Amino acid sequence: MTAPSFQTLALAATAPVARLTLNRPERLNALGATMMRELIEAARWLDGRPDVRVVIVSGAGRAFTAGADLRDSPVTEASTRSGNSWAVRREVGQLGLRMADAIESMRAVTIAQVHGYAVGGGVVLMAACDLRVAAEDAVHGYAVGGDAQVAGRHQHHAAEDAVLSIPEVELGIPLAWGGIPRLVREIGPALTKELVMTCRRFSPAEAKAAGFVNRVVPAARVAAEAEALAAELVRMPSVPLTITKEHVNSVTRAMGAGSTSFSDGDALLAATFDPESLEAAQKYLARTVGRKRD
């Protein structure tokens, strides 16, 4: 069966290992409405291929993904001025959640191969994958908190090293897309609160120490490491491998009972059009975009 073609993704589905690549390098693989819909479609297509046992999710170019794409945001369809009904606007608001759920519920084992920036929704996409391999050539001493945080933001890092952050609160919106329950599941409530509330960057080494990342390797080896991990999984008998994934996921769902994401989109839309949130977003974009232009 020939793999479908996409506008924003590249899919190489040579069984037993497929590679799903976010393929908008000129936009640092930002997650727009088109890409999210195509990720849902790709996940469904791969679920129809029982010979594909492992899927590696990676990003083309200099980044895994820079997070939500403001130029192709579904939020424009969700404004009350759009003329769309409440049901349509709510469905649009839940698009990121449906994308993350589609990746997480895939039958195949998924591996996030992360280099460069993994921002906001990119961290949620990592959390939706079963296993994570990240690039970091050395310990860069990412600063934590206060004035040191500002220094850490400007600290040099190798071009391909993974840099993780969750800037949504600073943008004036809550972390949505099922991000909060997924992060609480992976790293616990205290660290989730710190990373989401402070919006500070964190390194692959810190993410590994917290149990969020499985393997940290030099940037030049990150693709080979993800493929080696995939080969280890493929060598295992398929039935107990699949059962183990489903068993672990069912246990984590039971542990997180009550931590649901059904209203993520509603909260996101409510905050997005709040005047204070709009002002915060403008300040954040002026600072970050302006700094990149300098």
Image (tube, rainbow, N blue to C red):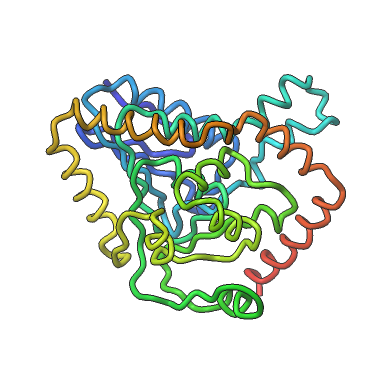
> Residue 145: x percent and y percent?
61, 73
Residue nearest the observer in this picture, 58 or 152: 152
Q: Is residue 90 visible?
A: yes
Q: Residue at x 32, y 42 (%)?
A: 56
> Residue 251: x percent and y percent?
39, 33
User: What is the count of numbered marks?
Assistant: 0
Residue nearest the observer in this picture, 241 or 157: 241
Relative height, residue 108 to residue 209 (above, below) = above
Q: Is residue 160 visible?
A: no
> Residue 132: x percent and y percent?
35, 50
Instruction: State which quarter of the image contains the C terminus.
Output: bottom right
Q: Residue at x 54, y 41 (%)?
A: 181
Relative height, residue 98 to residue 193 (above, below) = above
Q: Specify whether 42 is left or right of 182.
A: left
Instruction: State which quarter of the image contains the N terminus.
Output: top left
Q: Specify whether 22 is left or right of 190.
A: left
Q: Specify whether 20 is left or right of 266.
A: left
Location of residue 264 by image quarter:
top right
Q: Residue at x 34, y 23 (%)?
A: 47
Residue nearest the observer in this picture, 258 or 283: 258
> Residue 96: x percent and y percent?
58, 36
Q: Residue at x 66, y 40 (%)?
A: 73
Relative height, residue 291 to residue 199 (above, below) = below
Q: Specify whether 142 is left or right of 275.
A: left
Location of residue 231 by image quarter:
top left
